[in-house]
Amino acid sequence: FQLGTGSWDYVLGANYGVTYRNWGLSAMVNYTIKTKNDKEYRFGNQFNYALNAYKTYYLGTNFALTPQAGIGGEHFEKNKEFGFEVNDTGGNALFSRLGVEVNYRQYALGLSSMLPVAQDLNNGKVEVKSRFSVYLNINI
C-alpha cells in the first residue's frame, strides 16, 4: 500500500501465545504511529491485529509440521495534508488467514495466505486482494 512514505514511523507491538499439548493459540496487536513527511503529508496511523489457532505434528526428533488458521484485521486512520484530513482515505479490512510452517532443528520455513473477508478502504476506492507470503526464520 504505502511504500516509501518518506516519514519516520514508530511501531508498538505485542504478541501472546498459549499452548496445551500440541495445540496453540496466538494473538498479535500492533499500532503504527506515523509522522508527516517533508511534503507535509501524514499517512494515517495504523492498527493491526491477528488471532491464530494451530496444531503441531512432530514427525521425528528434528521435524515438526504446524498448520495454522485464523483471522486478522487492519484499521487505517485518515491521512492528513497540511494538518487537514484527506478525503477518501482510511478504512479497515478483515482477513481469513491460512498457513503452514515446517520446522527442522533451528530453522522454520513457512507459507501464509490472507484472504479478504470484508473491507472498506478509502471509501471503496481501494480494493485489497489476497496476500501470500513465504518466510524463513532461524532461531539462535
Image (cartoon, rainbow, N blue to C red):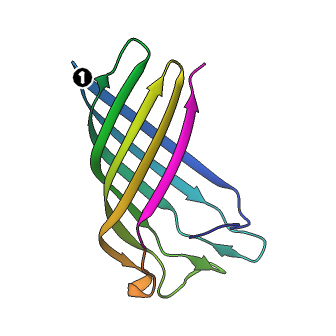
- Picture residue at 46% right of the left edge, 69% below the top: 77
Determine the image quadrant of residue 119: bottom left
Q: Where is residue 1? Give x, y as percent.
A: 56, 70
| Residue 35 vs residue 110, the one in the foreground | 110
Asked whether, in this view, residue 113 is left or right of residue 45, the answer is left
Instruction: Please determine whether, in this image, residue 111 is positioned above or below residue 77.
Output: above
Asked whether, in this view, residue 113 is left or right of residue 94, the answer is right
- Picture residue at 61% right of the left edge, 50% below the top: 10
Magenta span contains residue 135: yes
Crowding at mark 1 (Cα within 10 Å: few <14, some 14-19, many 20+) = few
Q: Where is residue 61? Give x, y as percent.
A: 39, 11
Q: Quadrant of the C terminus?
A: top right
Instruction: Please determine whether, in this image, residue 59 is positioned above or below residue 109.
Output: above
Determine the image quadrant of residue 35: bottom right
Of all residues shown, which one is farthest toward the front?
60
What amino acid does circle 1 point to?
A: Asn
Q: Where is residue 11? Give x, y as percent.
A: 56, 48
Magenta span contains residue 127: no
Of all residues shown, which one is farthest toward the top?
61
Q: Where is residue 44? Give x, y as percent.
A: 53, 69
Instruction: Please determine whether, in this image, residue 113 is positioned above or below residue 79.
Output: above
- Picture residue at 27% right of the left edge, 35% below the top: 54
Tag 1 residue: 22
Q: How many marks?
A: 1
| Residue 63 vs residue 86, the one in the foreground | 63
Q: Tag 1's secondary structure?
A: loop
The residue range painted magenta reads 129-140
Q: Main secondary structure of the magenta part?
A: strand
- Picture residue at 53% right of the left edge, 54% below the top: 32
Instruction: Please determine whether, in this image, residue 105 is positioned above or below residue 128.
Output: above
